[in-house]
Amino acid sequence: MIVPMKKVSLACMKEDRAAVLKALQKAGVLMLTRVEDGVPSGGEASANLRRMDVLLRRLKPYRKKRSLLEGLPEVEEAAFDQAGEEGIPYAGRAEELLAQRDALEKELAGKRAEADALRPWQALSAPLEDFAEGPYAVNAAGSVPARLAPLAEETLRRCGAAWETVGEDPRRTRFAVSCLKEAAEELFSALKDLEWEEAAFPKEQGTAAAVLARLELETAALSAQLSQTEEALRALAEEAETEFSLLYEQYRAANEREETPLGETLETVYLEGWARADRTDRLEAAVCKASGGVYSLALRDPAKGETPPTATKNNRIVSQFENITDMFSSPDYREPDPNPVMAPWYWLIFGLMMGDAGYGLMMAVLILLGKKLLRPSGTVAQLMNVMLYSSVTTMLCGVVFGSYFGETWNPLWFSPMDDPVAMLIFTLVIGVFHIFTGMICKMVQNVKQGRVWDAVFDQAAWMVLILGLGMLFLPALQAVGAALATAGALVVLFTAGREKKGFLGKAAGGLVGLYGITSYLSDILSYSRILALSLATGVVGMVMNMLAGMIQGNPIGWIFSLAIYVVGHVFNLALGLLSAYVHDCRLQYIEFYGKFFEGGGVPFRPFAIRTNQIRIRK
Amino acid sequence: MSGISIAIMGAAVCAALAGCGSALGVMAAGKAAAGVTSEKPELFGRMLVLQALPGTQGIYGFLTAVLIMVRIGVLGGSPAELTEAQGWAMFWAALPMAVVGLISGIAQGLTAASAIHMTGRQPDASGKGITMTALVETYAILALLTSILLVYGIAL
C-alpha cells in the first residue's frame, strides 16, 4: 500500500538549529522540501570534508584493498555520533606523513636530476669548484653536438685555450676548457654559435666522480627514508582504517546538515517537509528531545494541488519486489500500490522462464551463500531475495516440465523440448491471464472513481472479446466463443468513440478502438518469450551435458568433464538469470503496467545519514 | 547437394550470423561501457548487465543450430536420410533466426550503448535503459520462435 503522508512545518529557536537538524538526520523520517528564502547555516564541515576527501584520495595507495566478500566496516551508532574526536589525530598524523613523503620525493628527484647531469662528466679530472672565473683565466665545462666538435676545437685553438674532451658520448662532445680572461668573451660567443651548452655543476667540492659517489649515497639514504615513511603511512592506514572512513562520513553528514537551507526569522528557524503519517511520533520525539521542548510542529494532510512523495509499505515478501516497480517508476501518491499484484506474477513468470529444477536448486544455494558472505543491503538485498523466492517457482516448473540441468526426465505434465507448440499455447494463456489481471486492476480503479461504465466498456468488453477469440481455438466451445467475441466487438465498436463529438466522430472512434485488438494481440504474443527463454536455458544446459559426455572416455576425460559441468552450468545459470530478470521486468512494465499503472511518483527519500564507506550498526 | 548437408548449412549459417550480430552488438555496448567505467568505476556492475544484453542473439542462434542438429540426428544419434527438399526446408527454417539475429544484435548493441551513456549520466536510470534495450530483443525472440516452430514442424 501507499503510505499516507503528512505535511510537516517545523520551527525552533535559532540556537537549536544544529541539534534539531542532527536529530532529524539521525531519525531519518522527514523529507525536506525547499523553503523559500532558505539559508544554509554554513560552517566548518565543508572545508573539513574537502580536506578529508583530498586526504583519502592521497592515502588510497597505502590503504588495504577490500575484497568484495568482506563488506564495509561496521561502526556503532554511538561512535558515529561523537563528532570525530577519534579520527582527527589520525588524520593529522596522516597529513604530516604525506607532507614528509612529498618533501622527500621532491628532494630525491632533485638529487637524482643532479646525479644524472653529472654522470657524463665522471671522467673529468679537475675538481668541480675549479670551474669558475679566476683572476686571470676562465675555466668552463660544456658540450656541443658531436657533428660540430671539429669546428669547436678549431675555435678553441684560435682563441689559444687549453681543453680536454671528457667521456665518450656519440651525440654530444664534452669539453673542459681553460682560457685567458681576455680571450674569454670572443671564445664563448663563438662557441655559442656552435650550440654550446654550459654544464651546470652542483656547488660541491671535489671531482665529479667523488661528488657523484656522494650524491648516490645521499639518494640511497633518502630512498630508505622515503620507504620508511611509506611504511609508516601503510601502518597508519591499517591501524586507523575504520577511523578514516568514519571521519569522512561524519564530515559528510555534518556538511549535509550545514548545507540544508532553512527559513529564518529574528529568533527562529523553520523548515517544511513530508513525513510518513505512521512515523510522525518518531519525528516529534526526535525534535522534542533536541530542542528541549521549545518548538512548534504542525502536521496536516496533503492539499489538493500538492504532490506528496511516495513510500510503499508491504509485507516482508512483497516489499522485496518494490524495487522492480521503482526501477520503472514510483507509483503516484494517489494511485493504488501495484506491488502486491505484480509480485506473484513476477515470481511465477521468473520461474517459468528459468524452468529447470537443477538450476532452481543452484540459485537457492548460491543466493543463500551470497547472502551469508556479502550481507547485502538495500536494493541488492531485495534483488537477491526476489531471486531466492523465484528459485522456488523455478524448481516447481522444472519438476512440472521435467527439466533437470537441461536433461529431460519424467515431466509431470509435458516437456517443452518435445512439444514446443503446447508450451507456446501455455505461455500465451499465462499472458492472457496476466493482462486480464492488469485490466481488472484498472476496472477496480474506474469503479472506485465512480466510472462504472468506463470499466464495462473499456475493460470488461475487451476481456469478453479476447476470451471469445481464445475459445474459437477449442472445437467444443467454438459457438460460445464466436458469440462472446461478437458481443465484445460490438460493444467496443459502439462505445469506444463515446467521448467524441458528432456521429462521424463516434463512428471513427469506434473503429479506431476496435483496431486496438492488434495491440492486445501483440501484447499476448509477447509472452511467447517465456517459451524462448525456458528453451534457451534447457538447450544450452543440454549442450553442456553433451560436451561433457563426449570426453568421458577415460579418467582424465572424466576430470575435465566435471570442469565442463561446473563452468558450463554456472555460465548458463548466470545468462539465464540475466535474461529472466530483464524479460520478466519487461513483461511487467509494458504488457502489465501498461494496462493500469500510471506511475510518475516522487520516491520518498528522507533527510538521513547515508554512508557508503561504512555501515552503521544500530 | 544432399539433404543433410543443406540442413547443416542452415544450422551453420544460423549460429554464425546470429553470433556475428551479438559480437558486434556487445562490442558497441562494450566500447560505451568502457568509456563510462573509466570515469565512474563504481558503475561497472550496471554496465556489465547492459553490455551483456545484446549477447542473447548469439545464444538464440546457437540454440536454433543445436535444435536442427538434434532434429537431423547429427548430435546424439545417426544422421537421418534427408531428401533435398527436406534439407532446404531446414535451411529456410533456420533463416529467420540467422538474419534477425545478425541485425537485431547490432541494433540492440547500439541501443545498449545509448542506454549506457544515459546510465553514466544518471545511474538511477539504468532500469529504464535496460527496458529500452530489451524492447529490441523482442524481434529476435519472435524470430527464434518462428525458427523453432519451423524446425519442429518439418516432417522428416
Image (tube, helix red, strand yellow):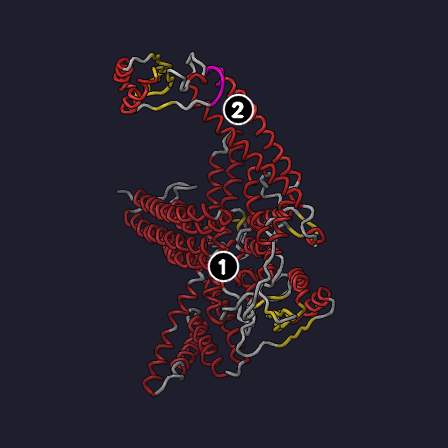
The circle drawn on residue A584 is: 1
- Kind of residue sitting beneath label 1: Asp
Q: Is residue B55 above or below residue A198?
A: below
The picture places residue A145, in percent across and down from the top left corner, at 30, 21
Q: Residues within 10 Å of mark 2 (few under 14, many from 20)?
A: some
Relative placement, left or right, of B24 versus A447 is: left
Amino acid at pointer 2: Thr
Q: Which residue is mark 2?
A: A219
- Towards the viewer: A614 or A183: A183
Image position of B107 (left or right of A3):
left
Q: Magenta segment range?
A: A203-211
Residue drawn where x is 57% and y is 78% of the image: A303
Q: Along the line of sight, which residue is nearer the eye, A432 or A246? A: A246
Q: Which of disc 2 and disc 1 is earlier in sequence?
A: 2
Q: Position of residue A210 (x, y in %)?
A: 49, 15
Q: Quadrant of the C terminus of chain A?
A: bottom right
Q: Residue at x 61, y 38 (%)?
A: A96
- Residue A13 position, x and y percent, is 67, 68
Residue A414 shown in magenta? no
Q: Identify the residue at image location x=61%, y=54%.
A: A44
